[in-house]
Image: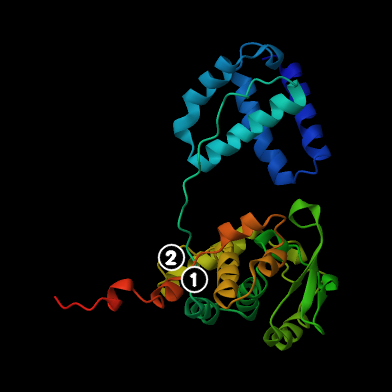
Amino acid sequence: MDEKLLNSHMEKLSTELKLKKSSDKTISIYSYFVKRFLLQLESSPERATEDDVKKFLANIIDSYNTKSYALLLSSLRFFFKRVVKRPVMIDIETPKIEKEIKDVLSKEEVERLIEAAPTKKSKLIIGFMYSTGLRVSELVSLSKKNLDLEDAQGVVKKGKGKKDRTFYFSKGLVSPFREYLSTIQGDMVFPGWKGKHMDPRNVQNLLERLRVKTGITKRVSPHTLRRSFATHLHDDGYDIKYIQELLGHSRVDTTERYIDVSSKQLKKIKNPYDSLNIKL
Protein backbone atom coordinates (compact mmCIF):
# COMPACT_ATOMS: atom_id res chain seq x y z
CA MET A 1 0.00 0.00 0.00
CA ASP A 2 1.12 3.54 -0.77
CA GLU A 3 2.76 5.13 2.30
CA LYS A 4 0.69 8.31 2.03
CA LEU A 5 -2.55 6.30 1.90
CA LEU A 6 -1.37 4.12 4.80
CA ASN A 7 -0.61 7.13 6.99
CA SER A 8 -3.97 8.67 6.14
CA HIS A 9 -5.86 5.58 7.29
CA MET A 10 -3.76 5.24 10.44
CA GLU A 11 -4.46 8.87 11.32
CA LYS A 12 -8.20 8.34 10.82
CA LEU A 13 -8.07 5.23 13.02
CA SER A 14 -6.30 7.16 15.79
CA THR A 15 -8.87 9.96 15.56
CA GLU A 16 -11.82 7.55 15.83
CA LEU A 17 -10.28 5.82 18.84
CA LYS A 18 -9.63 9.15 20.58
CA LEU A 19 -13.24 10.21 19.96
CA LYS A 20 -14.26 6.95 21.64
CA LYS A 21 -12.01 7.99 24.59
CA SER A 22 -9.86 4.90 24.20
CA SER A 23 -6.72 4.64 26.32
CA ASP A 24 -3.26 5.24 24.85
CA LYS A 25 -2.58 1.52 25.25
CA THR A 26 -5.69 0.59 23.25
CA ILE A 27 -4.77 3.06 20.51
CA SER A 28 -1.28 1.58 20.33
CA ILE A 29 -2.52 -2.04 20.15
CA TYR A 30 -5.24 -1.35 17.57
CA SER A 31 -2.83 0.69 15.44
CA TYR A 32 -0.26 -2.12 15.49
CA PHE A 33 -2.71 -4.77 14.30
CA VAL A 34 -4.39 -2.59 11.65
CA LYS A 35 -1.05 -1.42 10.26
CA ARG A 36 0.14 -5.00 10.01
CA PHE A 37 -2.97 -5.84 7.98
CA LEU A 38 -2.70 -2.80 5.70
CA LEU A 39 0.98 -3.38 4.92
CA GLN A 40 0.21 -6.74 3.31
CA LEU A 41 -2.97 -5.56 1.58
CA GLU A 42 -2.51 -5.30 -2.18
CA SER A 43 -5.59 -3.12 -2.76
CA SER A 44 -6.99 -0.21 -0.76
CA PRO A 45 -9.04 -1.05 2.37
CA GLU A 46 -12.11 0.42 0.62
CA ARG A 47 -11.81 -2.41 -1.91
CA ALA A 48 -10.78 -5.14 0.54
CA THR A 49 -12.96 -8.24 0.72
CA GLU A 50 -13.76 -10.76 3.40
CA ASP A 51 -11.39 -13.17 1.62
CA ASP A 52 -8.55 -10.62 1.93
CA VAL A 53 -9.09 -10.50 5.69
CA LYS A 54 -9.38 -14.28 6.02
CA LYS A 55 -6.17 -14.79 4.03
CA PHE A 56 -4.35 -12.41 6.38
CA LEU A 57 -5.79 -14.08 9.47
CA ALA A 58 -4.94 -17.57 8.25
CA ASN A 59 -1.29 -16.56 7.79
CA ILE A 60 -0.83 -15.19 11.32
CA ILE A 61 -3.34 -17.08 13.49
CA ASP A 62 -0.69 -19.46 14.82
CA SER A 63 1.41 -16.51 16.04
CA TYR A 64 -1.09 -15.47 18.73
CA ASN A 65 -2.92 -17.04 21.63
CA THR A 66 -6.70 -16.92 21.62
CA LYS A 67 -6.92 -13.73 23.68
CA SER A 68 -4.48 -11.80 21.45
CA TYR A 69 -6.16 -13.13 18.33
CA ALA A 70 -9.53 -11.90 19.62
CA LEU A 71 -7.95 -8.47 20.18
CA LEU A 72 -6.65 -8.52 16.60
CA LEU A 73 -10.17 -9.21 15.34
CA SER A 74 -11.57 -6.38 17.46
CA SER A 75 -8.98 -4.02 15.97
CA LEU A 76 -9.89 -4.90 12.38
CA ARG A 77 -13.61 -4.88 13.14
CA PHE A 78 -13.36 -1.36 14.57
CA PHE A 79 -11.26 -0.19 11.60
CA PHE A 80 -13.71 -1.43 8.98
CA LYS A 81 -16.76 -0.18 10.87
CA ARG A 82 -15.56 3.28 11.92
CA VAL A 83 -12.92 4.20 9.32
CA VAL A 84 -13.69 2.29 6.11
CA LYS A 85 -17.42 2.03 6.92
CA ARG A 86 -17.89 -1.33 5.20
CA PRO A 87 -19.28 -4.56 6.74
CA VAL A 88 -16.28 -6.70 5.73
CA MET A 89 -15.97 -8.40 9.14
CA ILE A 90 -19.64 -9.22 9.68
CA ASP A 91 -19.29 -13.00 9.10
CA ILE A 92 -15.90 -13.48 10.77
CA GLU A 93 -16.48 -14.88 14.26
CA THR A 94 -14.39 -14.30 17.35
CA PRO A 95 -13.25 -17.58 18.96
CA LYS A 96 -14.39 -18.32 22.47
CA ILE A 97 -11.66 -17.47 24.96
CA GLU A 98 -10.82 -20.45 27.12
CA LYS A 99 -11.27 -19.98 30.86
CA GLU A 100 -7.86 -19.92 32.46
CA ILE A 101 -7.24 -20.56 36.14
CA LYS A 102 -5.41 -17.48 37.38
CA ASP A 103 -2.96 -17.52 40.24
CA VAL A 104 -4.19 -16.06 43.53
CA LEU A 105 -1.83 -15.61 46.46
CA SER A 106 -2.80 -16.71 49.94
CA LYS A 107 -2.61 -14.11 52.71
CA GLU A 108 0.42 -15.96 54.07
CA GLU A 109 2.18 -15.62 50.70
CA VAL A 110 1.46 -11.88 50.63
CA GLU A 111 3.01 -11.62 54.08
CA ARG A 112 6.11 -13.48 52.89
CA LEU A 113 6.55 -11.09 49.97
CA ILE A 114 6.28 -8.00 52.17
CA GLU A 115 8.63 -9.40 54.81
CA ALA A 116 11.20 -10.34 52.15
CA ALA A 117 11.16 -6.89 50.49
CA PRO A 118 14.55 -5.22 51.12
CA THR A 119 13.52 -1.59 51.70
CA LYS A 120 10.74 0.41 53.34
CA LYS A 121 9.70 1.68 49.92
CA SER A 122 9.45 -1.81 48.39
CA LYS A 123 7.52 -3.11 51.39
CA LEU A 124 5.03 -0.24 51.07
CA ILE A 125 4.68 -0.76 47.31
CA ILE A 126 3.62 -4.38 47.82
CA GLY A 127 1.47 -3.68 50.86
CA PHE A 128 -0.22 -0.73 49.18
CA MET A 129 -1.05 -2.65 45.99
CA TYR A 130 -2.53 -5.49 48.00
CA SER A 131 -4.41 -3.12 50.33
CA THR A 132 -5.95 -1.05 47.51
CA GLY A 133 -6.19 -3.30 44.47
CA LEU A 134 -4.67 -0.52 42.36
CA ARG A 135 -3.40 -1.24 38.87
CA VAL A 136 0.38 -0.85 38.58
CA SER A 137 -0.11 2.08 36.18
CA GLU A 138 -2.24 3.80 38.83
CA LEU A 139 0.28 3.07 41.56
CA VAL A 140 3.29 4.58 39.77
CA SER A 141 1.27 7.67 38.78
CA LEU A 142 -0.01 8.39 42.29
CA SER A 143 0.88 11.86 43.58
CA LYS A 144 1.09 12.99 47.20
CA LYS A 145 -1.67 15.57 46.70
CA ASN A 146 -4.11 12.76 45.85
CA LEU A 147 -3.34 10.79 49.02
CA ASP A 148 -5.29 11.50 52.22
CA LEU A 149 -3.52 9.90 55.16
CA GLU A 150 -6.03 11.25 57.70
CA ASP A 151 -8.86 9.17 56.22
CA ALA A 152 -6.66 6.39 54.76
CA GLN A 153 -7.91 7.00 51.24
CA GLY A 154 -6.87 8.56 47.96
CA VAL A 155 -8.00 9.40 44.44
CA VAL A 156 -6.90 7.85 41.17
CA LYS A 157 -6.96 10.64 38.59
CA LYS A 158 -7.98 9.64 35.10
CA GLY A 159 -7.59 5.92 35.59
CA LYS A 160 -8.66 3.29 33.09
CA GLY A 161 -11.61 4.58 31.08
CA LYS A 162 -10.48 8.17 31.86
CA LYS A 163 -12.38 8.04 35.17
CA ASP A 164 -11.45 9.37 38.60
CA ARG A 165 -12.18 7.07 41.52
CA THR A 166 -11.64 6.93 45.25
CA PHE A 167 -9.64 4.10 46.77
CA TYR A 168 -9.14 3.08 50.40
CA PHE A 169 -6.23 1.49 52.21
CA SER A 170 -5.50 -0.11 55.57
CA LYS A 171 -5.16 2.23 58.52
CA GLY A 172 -2.21 0.06 59.48
CA LEU A 173 -0.31 1.66 56.59
CA VAL A 174 -0.90 5.27 57.70
CA SER A 175 1.95 5.52 60.20
CA PRO A 176 4.55 3.79 57.97
CA PHE A 177 3.45 6.04 55.10
CA ARG A 178 3.90 9.22 57.14
CA GLU A 179 7.41 8.14 58.05
CA TYR A 180 8.22 7.12 54.46
CA LEU A 181 6.80 10.26 52.79
CA SER A 182 8.77 12.52 55.12
CA THR A 183 11.92 11.24 53.37
CA ILE A 184 10.63 11.59 49.80
CA GLN A 185 11.21 14.71 47.71
CA GLY A 186 8.87 15.79 44.91
CA ASP A 187 5.21 15.09 44.27
CA MET A 188 5.24 11.36 43.46
CA VAL A 189 4.35 8.85 46.19
CA PHE A 190 6.61 6.21 44.63
CA PRO A 191 9.11 8.16 42.51
CA GLY A 192 11.46 6.58 40.04
CA TRP A 193 14.78 7.91 38.79
CA LYS A 194 15.29 11.60 39.67
CA GLY A 195 11.79 11.90 41.11
CA LYS A 196 10.02 11.02 37.85
CA HIS A 197 7.35 8.35 37.35
CA MET A 198 8.56 4.90 38.27
CA ASP A 199 8.61 2.45 35.37
CA PRO A 200 5.94 -0.25 35.96
CA ARG A 201 8.52 -2.82 34.94
CA ASN A 202 10.51 -1.97 38.06
CA VAL A 203 7.56 -3.15 40.16
CA GLN A 204 7.18 -6.29 38.06
CA ASN A 205 10.90 -7.05 38.40
CA LEU A 206 10.76 -6.49 42.17
CA LEU A 207 7.92 -8.99 42.54
CA GLU A 208 9.68 -11.56 40.38
CA ARG A 209 12.86 -11.31 42.47
CA LEU A 210 10.84 -11.70 45.67
CA ARG A 211 8.92 -14.65 44.22
CA VAL A 212 12.21 -16.47 43.68
CA LYS A 213 13.57 -15.38 47.05
CA THR A 214 10.51 -16.62 48.96
CA GLY A 215 10.14 -19.83 46.96
CA ILE A 216 6.58 -19.04 45.83
CA THR A 217 5.78 -21.21 42.81
CA LYS A 218 2.78 -19.19 41.60
CA ARG A 219 3.12 -16.37 39.13
CA VAL A 220 3.54 -13.12 41.06
CA SER A 221 2.81 -9.82 39.32
CA PRO A 222 1.06 -6.54 40.13
CA HIS A 223 -2.06 -8.07 38.62
CA THR A 224 -1.73 -11.10 40.89
CA LEU A 225 -1.84 -8.78 43.91
CA ARG A 226 -4.88 -7.00 42.48
CA ARG A 227 -6.67 -10.31 41.87
CA SER A 228 -5.70 -11.56 45.34
CA PHE A 229 -7.12 -8.37 46.89
CA ALA A 230 -10.46 -8.99 45.14
CA THR A 231 -10.57 -12.72 45.91
CA HIS A 232 -9.79 -12.27 49.61
CA LEU A 233 -12.51 -9.61 49.96
CA HIS A 234 -14.96 -12.01 48.31
CA ASP A 235 -13.85 -14.85 50.60
CA ASP A 236 -14.50 -12.57 53.57
CA GLY A 237 -18.11 -12.15 52.47
CA TYR A 238 -18.13 -8.73 50.78
CA ASP A 239 -20.65 -8.18 47.99
CA ILE A 240 -19.24 -8.25 44.48
CA LYS A 241 -20.78 -4.83 43.72
CA TYR A 242 -18.59 -3.25 46.40
CA ILE A 243 -15.53 -5.04 45.04
CA GLN A 244 -16.43 -3.80 41.56
CA GLU A 245 -16.34 -0.20 42.82
CA LEU A 246 -13.01 -0.70 44.59
CA LEU A 247 -11.42 -2.17 41.46
CA GLY A 248 -12.83 0.56 39.23
CA HIS A 249 -14.61 -1.82 36.86
CA SER A 250 -17.46 -0.45 34.75
CA ARG A 251 -19.04 -3.92 34.42
CA VAL A 252 -19.68 -6.45 37.17
CA ASP A 253 -18.90 -9.39 34.86
CA THR A 254 -15.33 -8.06 34.59
CA THR A 255 -15.08 -8.24 38.38
CA GLU A 256 -16.49 -11.77 38.36
CA ARG A 257 -13.65 -12.86 36.08
CA TYR A 258 -11.15 -11.43 38.57
CA ILE A 259 -12.46 -13.42 41.49
CA ASP A 260 -11.46 -17.03 41.93
CA VAL A 261 -12.87 -19.20 44.66
CA SER A 262 -9.83 -19.89 46.83
CA SER A 263 -8.72 -23.44 47.53
CA LYS A 264 -9.08 -22.67 51.26
CA GLN A 265 -12.81 -22.03 50.75
CA LEU A 266 -13.22 -25.11 48.58
CA LYS A 267 -11.61 -27.30 51.24
CA LYS A 268 -14.32 -26.22 53.71
CA ILE A 269 -17.06 -27.77 51.56
CA LYS A 270 -18.28 -31.04 52.97
CA ASN A 271 -17.83 -33.77 50.42
CA PRO A 272 -21.14 -35.62 49.69
CA TYR A 273 -19.32 -38.96 49.98
CA ASP A 274 -18.86 -38.25 53.70
CA SER A 275 -22.61 -38.54 54.24
CA LEU A 276 -22.78 -42.04 52.80
CA ASN A 277 -23.29 -44.83 55.32
CA ILE A 278 -20.75 -47.15 53.78
CA LYS A 279 -17.35 -48.65 54.54
CA LEU A 280 -14.92 -49.97 51.96
Q: Nearer the viewer, residue 84 or 5?
A: 84
Q: How is the image coloured?
A: rainbow
**Residue 237 image offset from top left, x and y in percent:** 59, 76
- Rendered view: 185 above or below 248: below
- Rendered view: 84 above or below 246: above
Give yes or no for contact between labels 2 and 1 (Cβ–Cβ under 8 Å). yes
Category of crowding for the residue at label 2, using alpha-carbon neighbours closer than 10 angstroms: few (below 14), some (14–19), many (at least 20): few
**Residue 90 image offset from top left, x and y in percent:** 63, 24
Q: Secondary structure at mark 1?
A: loop
Q: Nearer the viewer, residue 32 or 50?
A: 50
Res 105 label: 1
What residue appears at the point 48 percent right and 59 percent down from the top-left corner?
A: 102
Q: Quadrant of residue 242?
A: bottom right
Left or right relative to 156: residue 53? left
Q: Nearer the viewer, residue 167 or 235?
A: 235
Q: Nearer the viewer, residue 242 or 154?
A: 242
The amino acid beneath tag 1 is: Leu
**Residue 171 image offset from top left, x and y in percent:** 71, 86
Category of crowding for the residue at label 1, using alpha-carbon neighbours closer than 10 angstroms: few (below 14), some (14–19), many (at least 20): many
Q: Quadrant of residue 34?
A: top right
Q: Secondary structure at mark 2?
A: loop
Farthest residue, direction left = 280
Res 218 label: 2
Spatial separation of the CA atoms under disc 2 and disc 1: 8 Å
What residue appears at the point 66 percent right and 29 percent down from the top-left corner?
A: 77
Q: Earlier in the sequence, mark 2 or mark 1?
A: 1
What residue appears at the point 65 percent right and 77 percent down from the top-left corner?
A: 124
Farthest residue, direction right = 145
What residue appears at the point 53 percent right and 21 percent down from the top-left corner?
A: 54
**Residue 134 image offset from top left, x and y in percent:** 68, 66
Number of numbered labels in the structure image: 2
